[in-house]
Amino acid sequence: MTRFKELIKSYFEEPSHNHVISSAVIESLSYFADDDSFNFVLEKGIRSEVATIRATAVKHLWRFKDPRVREILRVMIKDESSEVRSAVVNSLSELKEKDLLIQIANNEDEDG
């Protein structure tokens, strides 16, 4: 299994990769839901400069059982990209985080 994960990760590092491939790598790793995959998604996905890649990482973050997931989602809801903010709402829905969703909706009402 480790070799398979390493192969998947190698596609992210390809010089000719594009956002679609990078997003597919992030999504694929999320299905493993282990610490190694979580760290990769955090490093390469959440911290990416590309909104589409950040959104993909956030969209699939709920699969990880890491206690930091909810805090990361709390921070990412403030992302400048509406695509990322929408992905946060999807992840929170998957996590059944009604309180956080209500809090986000209330903050949106106050802001705009």
Image (cartoon, rainbow, N blue to C red):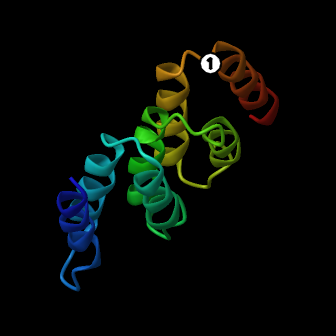
Q: Is residue 62 left or right of residue 1?
A: right
Closer to the camera, 39 or 60?
A: 39
Closer to the camera, 23 or 112?
A: 23
Q: Image quarter for residue 108?
A: top right
What residue would you read off at disc 1?
Answer: 97
Q: Is residue 41 left or right of residue 105?
A: left
Closer to the camera, 78 or 1?
A: 1
Location of the C terminus (image quadrant): top right
Pointer 1: residues within 10 angstroms few (<14), some, or many (20+)?
few
Residue 95 image point, x, y percent: 53, 22
Q: Residue at x 38, y 48 (%)?
A: 56
Q: Residue at x 54, y 65 (%)?
A: 47
Q: Image quarter for residue 69?
A: top right
Is 4 placed above or below 87 here?
A: below
Q: Tell which residue pokes out farthest to the bottom in this image.
A: 15
- The residue tagged with tag 1: helix, strand or loop? loop
Residue 41 image point, x, y percent: 44, 56
Residue 81 image point, x, y percent: 54, 53
Q: Is residue 105 left or right of residue 39?
A: right
Residue 30 image point, x, y percent: 35, 44
Q: Residue at x 17, y 58 (%)?
A: 4
Q: Tell which residue pokes out farthest to the right in this image.
A: 110
Is 32 placed above or below 93 here?
A: below
Q: Residue at x 64, y 46 (%)?
A: 72
Counting labels gives 1
Three-letter amino acid code of the residue under disc 1: Glu
